[in-house]
């Protein structure tokens, strides 16, 4: 009977250690999931900010202003019904 009790005690201790180990792993995995979720939210926010920034950089008015101010470009003035002639080098 004593052996049987010792075997049951040993099995109970092993079971308790297994339970503690499983619980610890579960807690670590949950913390890892929380950290990854927070990073995903941060990356999503950064991505949305980058999309908004790209949208403002590609705005037609901004491109036109830069072309006019920095590159000194201007919109050609064409009379109604006229077509610009091709240069002699382009016609060949």
Image (cartoon, grey):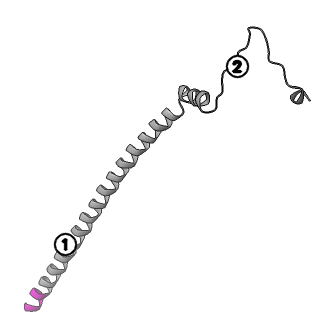
**Tag count:** 2
Q: Which mark is residue 76?
A: 2
Crowding around mark 2 (Cα neighbors within 10 Å: few <14, some 14 to 19, many 20+) is few
Residue that appears at 34% across and 56% down = 36
Q: Main secondary structure of the magenta part?
A: helix
Foreground of the two, 18 or 82: 82
SS category of the residue bearing label 2: loop
Q: Which residue is mark 1?
A: 20
What's the magenta region? Answer: 1-6
Measured as percent of width and height from the top left, residue 50 is found at 45, 41
Position of the N terminus, as image quadrant, is: bottom left
Q: Is residue 84 left or right of residue 29?
A: right
Measured as percent of width and height from the top left, residue 2 is found at 7, 91
Measured as percent of width and height from the top left, residue 81 is found at 77, 8
SS category of the residue bearing label 1: helix
Can you say whether 53 is above or below 84 in the image?
Answer: below
Foreground of the two, 65 or 2: 65
Measured as percent of width and height from the top left, residue 54 is found at 50, 37
- Which quarter of the figure has residue 11? bottom left
Residue that appears at 35% across and 47% down = 41
**Cα–Cα span, label 1 and label 2:** 79 Å
């Amino acid at each position: 009977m004593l052996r049987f009790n010792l075997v049951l005690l040993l099995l109970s201790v092993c079971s308790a250690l297994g339970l503690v180990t499983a619980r610890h792993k579960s807690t670590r995995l949950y913390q890892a999931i929380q950290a990854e979720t927070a990073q995903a939210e941060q990356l999503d926010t950064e991505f949305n900010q980058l999309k908004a920034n790209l949208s403002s950089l590609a705005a037609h008015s901004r491109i036109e202003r830069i072309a006019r101010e920095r590159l000194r470009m201007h919109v050609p003035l064409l009379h109604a019904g006229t077509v610009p002639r091709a240069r002699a080098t382009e016609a060949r």
